Image (spheres, helix red, strand yellow):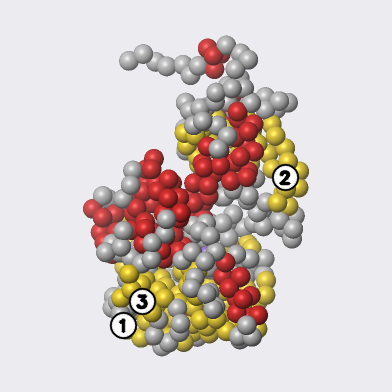
Amino acid sequence: MPDLRSFLESLEEEGDLVRIDRAVSPKYEATALMKEYDGKKALLFERLAGRKAVVGICGTKRRLSKALGVPAEKTRQFLMESIRNPREPSMTKKYKAKTELAGLTELPILTHFEKDAGPYLTSAIVSAKIPKESGENVSIHRLMVINDNQLAIRIVPRHLHQICQMARELGRSSLDVGIAVGLHPAVLLAASSPAAFGVSEYAVANRLMGDLEVVDCESVDARVPAEAEIVIEGKIALNKQVDEGPFVDITGTYDIVRKQPIIRVEKILCRQDYLYHALLPSGSEHGLLMGFPQEAKIAESVAGVVPRVRDVNLTRGGCHWLHAAVSIDKQTEGDAKNAILAAFAGHPSLKHVVIVDPDVDVNDSEQVEWAIATRFQGNRGMVIVSDARGSSLDASGNQDLSLTTKVGIDATRSFLKPKEKFEKARIPS
Ligand code: MN
């Protein structure tokens, strides 16, 4: 079974991992180093508050493709197929995490940015069973450390939120959760994927990895991957809330303080010589885990209106979330406008999209800007949709109602002019 340790070994063999062997503080110092290497190399802190920690295992698209064992151009498609064809993971009896810890403060949990409310777990998956039904949900949530045995959990109105609501309606006061840290990238990607409510993201991960083993928690009714480096068993208090935040989210700005639920920790277990996973908020690993599945959705949506989509990139400058560049094989004048509308439909948080021709690399912002400079006319190439539902993370929009103005840019060459006008000049070799 592939796990985090085997994946790290393969990164190191390829020279894609940098070891930091000096002692590093989990307060700010680790974040500064993570920022320095962000999007470039994965890191292994040998002594983060005396413990080992990995950084950036999902920090480039190449690493994601490698983790899934498929070529780069097939990765998005493979992810979507796995979401549509989940397969139950196999159950096993025991965790590999066997050493019990006394409290959360024993873990090397990072304090990331100046105004953050405190230390946060940022790479943890949280699993919960759907009450009275057979389904399960697994998703990534930021978890604020309150003290040794309490966390605050940010729950956006998606699946876990729905499960909490169902438990409340049954008169329950708490919801059992299994929290796991230190996992293979495929598990994290599955937990970030847009699987339907009721579909266990473990079943998506199992499909992606070929083999995932999960295990029942010891003190609560929830499941975690057997390979997890750290397992936290807990209960979400359904009628108790606390101030959560401020905390830096995907845009690199501070998310507001909200009342959010508390998790009471029942048990903490770790593997001997465990590997913590530190994930930089607003870094490329954060962006790719959120954005990569959305690129797949955009690609599918645009493929519904134009014959061929070459590539999609939710750009780094656009926080891997708000800006997309999409290359298409344009067949008729007007195709790019339809592609703009389809891109917005495929990823509702998308704010700006640029459509380009196949000779422009969407992964290179300079090339995309060149296409805007040479192939776009503002009076006829722009689509503006005022006050559409967008991202709650867009600080310039109406954050309470998640309203934002969306702009699409057609930077494909016009068919109404001779092709030679837009030809990229080459130097004969
Ligand atoms: Mn789900």
> Residue 197 is drawn in which quadrant?
bottom right
Residue 421 appears at what percent x and percent y?
A: 56, 13
Secondary structure category for the residue under label 2? strand
Secondary structure category for the residue under label 3? strand
Q: Is mark 2 within 8 Å of ligand 1?
A: no
354 lies left or right of 361: right
Q: Which residue is mark 2?
A: 405
State whether residue 316 appears in this view.
Answer: no
392 lies left or right of 37: right
State whether residue 95 appears in this view.
Answer: yes
Label drawn at residue 215: 3
Q: Which quarter of the image is occupied by the C terminus? A: top left
**Mark in front: 3 vs 2:** 3
Task: Check disc 2 and give the amino acid type.
Answer: Thr
Residue 66 appears at what percent x and percent y?
A: 32, 50
| CA–CA distance in space, label 1 to label 3 | 13 Å
Q: Earlier in the sequence, mark 1 or mark 2?
A: 1
Residue 294 appears at what percent x and percent y?
A: 53, 49
